[in-house]
Image (cartoon, grey):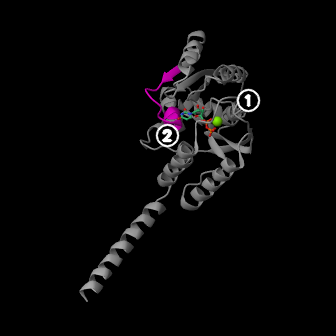
Amino acid sequence: MNPQLDEDRRTTGPNPSDAPRLSLSVVVPCANEEEVLLETHRQLTAALAQLSLTFEILYVDDGSTDSTPGILRQLQLGHDRVKVLRLSRNFGHQVAITAGMTYAGGDAVVVIDADLQDPPEVIAEFVKSWREGYDVAYGVRTERQGENAFKRGTAKLFYKIIGWLSNTDIPADTGDFRLMDRKVVNALLSMEEHDRFIRGMVSWLGFSQLAIPYRRKSRLAGKTKYPLVKMIRFAIDAILSFSTIPLKVATGFGFLASGMAVVGILLAFY
Ligand code: UDP
Ligand code: MG
C-alpha cells in the first residue's frame, strides 16, 4: 500500500474528500452457484455503490460444471467493474479465494461467499473500520440461520479443539467473510502454504484486527458445497497446519511402539 495513503487515512479518519482515492476489490468464490449469482451480483453492486470508493468484483469460478461460467461471462461483458477468473478444475474454497486475491488490485480486499449467507451490507461496516485504521475487519456470526444442529455443533467443537491445540488465537464463529488491507493481502500471498486455512493465517499474521458481529443468513438458493467429508478434511488440514501437538502425539506413539517392540524382543531372548 502507498504509505502516504495509509498515513492519510489513519490521521484524517473518514474524510469524504480523500475517500474516492481508495479502491476495494471484492473476491467471490463460486462453485456451481447458478441459482444465486445474478441476485448476489445485484445485491453486492447495490451495497458497494453506497460506499464512496471505487470497486471491482472478482468472481472466481472454482471449476463449476453448471451454468455458472456462462452467467459470469455475461456479468463480465455487461459491467466494467467485473473480473472473472476461471480455475481449470475444482480446487476448493480456500484456493479459489487465494487465486482471487492474487488478481485483486484494490487497496483492500473483501472476501464474501457467493450464496448471500454473508450480507453485502456488512461490507460498509468493514470499510468503516478500515478507514478508522484497522487492517482487518472480520465477520463474527452471532446467529447462523438455516444451519442444522449438527453443523452448528461440529463448528463449535472444531473451534474448541483448535483453540486447545493451537498457539494462534483463532476467533470462533468466523469464516472468510472479512476485509483485509493491501499489506495484509500481500503478507498472506507471500505465504506458500499448500493446504490453506485462511482465517487462521490472517490471525497468525497479526496486524490490527476488529471483529464485526453479524447475522449469517440461510443460503439464498442451491445446496452447500461443503458436504461432511469435505468439512472434516478442511478441519483436519486446519488443525494440522496450526498445531504441532498431533505430530508430537504421533511421534510419542512411534517411540512407545518401538520401545515395546524392543522389550518384546528382549523378553523373547530371555
Ligand atoms: N466454494 C468454492 N469451492 C468449493 C466449495 C465452495 O469456491 O469447492 C464457494 C461456494 O460457491 C461459496 C463459498 O465457497 O461461495 C462457501 O461455500 P458453501 O456456501 O457451499 O459453504 P457453507 O456456507 O455451506 O459452509
Ligand atoms: Mg454458504
In whole angstroms, how far apart are the C-alphas of marks 1 and 2? 25 Å
**Residue at image coords 62%, 40%:** 136
Q: Residue 217, position in %: x, y?
A: 73, 36
Q: Is residue 98 left or right of residue 172?
A: left
Residue 125: image x %, image y %?
72, 34
Q: Of all residues shown, which one is farthest toward the top?
A: 78
- Residue pictured at 48% horizontal, 43% vertical: 196
From which residue to which does the magenta span run? Answer: 84-98
Q: Can you name the residue that lies furthest to the bottom here?
A: 270
Which residue lies under the disc numbered 2?
188
Identify residue type, mark 2.
Leu
- Residue at (61%, 22%) from the top-left corner? 34
Residue 184 figure quarter: top right
Q: Is mark 2 within 8 Å of ligand 1?
A: no
Q: Is 85 contained in the magenta span?
A: yes
The vertical placement of 135 against 103, above or below, is: below
> Camera-side residue: 191 or 60?
60
